[in-house]
Image (cartoon, rainbow, N blue to C red):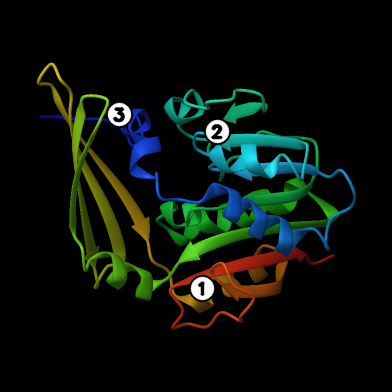
Amino acid sequence: MKKSIAYEKLALIYEHVMRRVNYSDWSDYIYCITQKYVKDDPFVLELAGGNCNLANYLSTYYRNIVVTDSSRWMLLNDSLNVLPKVCCDMSLLPFKNKFDLVYSTFDSVNYLTSEKKLQRLFYEVRNVLTDDGIFTFDVSLEKNSYVHVRQPLRKGSYKGIKYIHQTEFDEKRKIHRNIFKIEFDDGSTFREIHKQKIYMFEDYFKLMDKAGLYTVECYEGFTFKNAKPSSARAQFIVKKDL
């Protein structure tokens, strides 16, 4: 079995693995929590946008979206291919222009597995935000990891590609791992390991404060209830501290 780069082979079956995700409802939610903070026809940047499914839906509300992701394989699997895309690390943004709205979803921020990298992300976002701009992102908290390890093994197939999806959570190191074993019809097999750091709820506020950002709202995922340390997911809306 060969080891592949994260999202290199998974990109081929990602649409199937995420088939239960309602991108339309998710884009509606992102619009609802952001529209009162941004000007008309804003410039928008998505971080870790994957195959652009969410951005394609959100573009009905916000026309000027640039999608980024560190995986070129994911970006190449954009089914519509109408939005501009940039392959880059979200903690090393290559932009000189400013954005009115920066957003990240699917707990992509958790893929930054050290405080140093997470801190760097917040600095980078501050640099590309307009003075009145906002950054919204969601994170997975510890409770969510315990929910997912209740069903630690999933299997499936898509277009002749078989896969096994295994979920693990290291309670001591606070590392959540998704392991994909992918088998193609020619018999070749690959293994991808996706690691996420499950930070303490309070860590986000601490690191954002150091980067010159402050929280405007913090909701439980997909709701308008205030998030708390015991929440499964949290949705942050933050601004620059001028």
- Rounded to the nearest angstrom, the CA distance separating label 2 from label 3 is 18 Å
Residue, far top: 186
Residue at 58% x, 40% y is 92
Nearest the viewer among 27 and 180 is 27
Marks 3 and 1: CB-CB under 8 Å? no
**Residue neighbourhood size for the residue with mark 3, other residues' Cα within 10 Å, grouped as few (<14), some (14–19), many (≥20):** many
Q: Nearer the viewer, residue 228 or 159?
A: 159
Q: Secondary structure at mark 1?
A: helix
Disc number lying in front (3 or 1): 3
Residue bearing the label numbered 2: 88
In this picture, residue 33 sits left or right of residue 151: right
In the image, residue 82 lies at what x, y percent? 66, 24
Can you give x and y, in whole percent of width and height, for residue 225 in the image? 61, 80
Q: Earlier in the sequence, mark 2 or mark 3?
A: 3
The amino acid at mark 3 is Lys
Marks 2 and 1, how far apart at CA: 25 Å
Indicate the quadrant containing the C terminus: top left, top right, bottom left or bottom right: bottom right
Disc 2 secondary structure class? loop
Tag 1: amino acid: Asp
Identify the mark nearer the N-term, 2 or 1: 2
When the figure is inspected, residue 234 is found, relative to residue 68, above or below; the finding is below
Amino acid on which the number 2 mark rests in the picture: Cys
**Residue 101 vs residue 26, the one in the foreground:** 26
Choose top left, top right, bottom left or bottom right for residue 123. bottom right
| Horizontal and vertical percent position of residue 14 | 37, 37
The residue carrying mark 3 is: 9
Which mark, residue 242? none
> Going 47% across and 26% down the picture, which residue do you hit?
77
Q: Callout 2: few (<14), some (14-19), or many (20+) C-alpha neighbours within 10 Å? A: some
Q: How many marks?
A: 3
Residue bearing mark 1: 203
